Amino acid sequence: MYHAIVAHKVRAVFASISRGDAWPMIDSLAPRFVYRFEGDSPIGGVRNSRESMQLWWERMYRLFPGLSFVVRDVLVAGAPWNTRICTQLDFLMPLPDGRTYRNVVMQSMRMRWGRITEIHTLEDTQRCERLLRWQADMGKAEALAPPISDAEWPQRGPFMGAQPQPA
């Protein structure tokens, strides 16, 4: 029963985000959390404050107007003090020509006593990069902005934001 309640809540949060209201997601975060979104783009980075999450969602709604999520699957495991949640999502955004931008998103979350402590998001970063490049070419400068991140991003190291040094 607990797992079904958590899955229902996760679906409700994504429905709220799809209506343009990210506050239920932000309010579900524990006082100490980490939200990691992979990719070297304006939406990549690591956030661990409500303020950075608010700024990030504001950016998401500017870069992806009309964004919505279709929840394909929610898997919940564990007890209330150590709950693991995995989601499979379709990310959709209407394009000016009437077509729809689509991307696939996978998330792994941890929850403790009803509050999210960790989120790790993966998507097709190449597809996202093509969309952001197209937006930049159309004059949307924020599509090339640095990530909103509370930690160094991209991380340093070979092929992680720093050029590899020749031997």
Image (spheres, grey):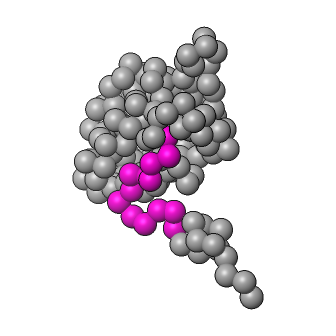
**Residue sitting nearer the eye, 18 or 148:** 148
Q: Residue drawn 40% across and 31% down?
A: 62
x, y percentage for residue 129? 61, 43
Relative to 165, residue 4 above or below: above
Report x, y in % for residue 24.
30, 31
Classify residue 61 as left or right of residue 125.
Answer: left
Residue 73 visible? The answer is no
- Of 12 and 82, nearer the camera is 12
Q: Residue furthest top?
A: 98
Whether residue 60 appears in magenta in the rendering, the answer is no
Name above or below for residue 27 compared with residue 90.
Answer: below
In this view, the residue farthest toward the right is 167
Secondary structure that dominates the magenta span: loop
Residue 47 position by quadrant: bottom left
Residue visible at 48% across and 29% down in the picture: 64
Q: Position of residue 71 (x, y in %)?
A: 55, 26
Residue 44 in the image: above or below residue 158 = above
Residue 41, image x and y in percent? 53, 49
| Picture quarter with the C terminus | bottom right
Magenta stretch containing residue 149, yes or no? yes
Query: Which residues, given as a range, are shown in magenta?
Result: 143-155
- Which of 44 and 7 lies nearest the eye of the viewer? 44
Q: Tell me if residue 161 comes above or below residue 70 in the rendering.
A: below
Can I make out residue 20 in this image?
yes
Taking 16 as reference, is 11 left or right?
right
Q: Residue at x 42, y 56 (%)?
A: 46
The residue located at (55%, 16%) in the rendering is: 96
User: Which quadrant of the figure has residue 98?
Assistant: top right
Residue toward you, 154 or 146: 146
